[in-house]
Amino acid sequence: MTRSKRMLLRRTHPQDISAILEMERHPDNERYVHRWEQEEHMAAAMSEHHLHIVIENLAGRPIGYIIAAGLHPESDEMQLIRLVVVEKGKGYGKEALKLIMGLVFRELNKKRLRMDLKASNERARNLCESVGFYAEPVRHRNEEDGTEETLLAMAIGEAEYFGRHAR
């Protein structure tokens, strides 16, 4: 799909789902990532409207995954549903985000990319802001356990992307 000097982004295969579930449930990720069941990941991986992507290091070891919605041609926006990396602090998240942004704006010709973050996830907010995302109005979501979660909407448009990342 796309690659850099340190990683490869490729479509998710059925045999990747168990590793993805482990990443999702990793202690560093579970409080920020809404948990999906195996069937939900499989449905997104097989959907023509989603990108379900494994992030691999160049040795072929999965180090994260990405899920994005809005792949259908009539949509000019994509929503980044997940960006999960298991090895924190090594720049993998930033590199993967830049690769997916390039794919969204350069190859898929979308006009906007957005992502909802849990407001308490400062690391994700800082990551998004470092590559040009801006904050939009805060939303609230009711969780299954009855609690309310505050979500921060982050977005970047085509003009901002190409302004920061030359054509």
Image (tube, helix red, strand yellow):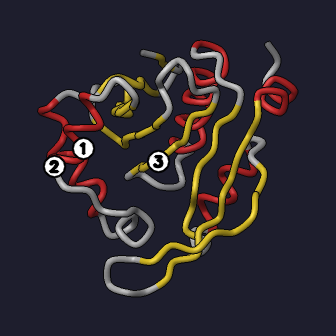
Quadrant in the rendering for residue 152: bottom right
The label number, if any, that marks residue 79 in the structure image: none
Q: Nearer the viewer, residue 39 or 28?
A: 39
Residue at 59% over, 12% down: 107
Q: Quadrant of the C terminus?
A: top right
Residue that badge 3 annotates:
81
The residue that disc 1 covers is: 41
User: Helix, strand, or loop for circle 2?
Assistant: helix
Establish if 40 lies above or below 29.
above
Q: Which residue is mark 2?
A: 38
Counting from the top left corner in percent of width and height, residue 48 is at 34, 23
Q: Nearer the viewer, residue 56 or 89?
A: 56
Q: Amino acid at mark 1?
A: His
Above or below: residue 85 compared with residue 65: below
Q: Residue furthest right?
A: 163
Sort mark 2 into few (<14), some (14-19) or many (20+) by Cα contacts within 10 Å.
Answer: few
Amino acid residing under circle 3: Ile
User: What percent of the width, then of the height, locates residue 111?
Assistant: 71, 27
In terms of depth relative to the viewer, which is nearer, 40 or 10?
A: 40
Cα separation, mark 1 vs mark 3, equals: 12 Å
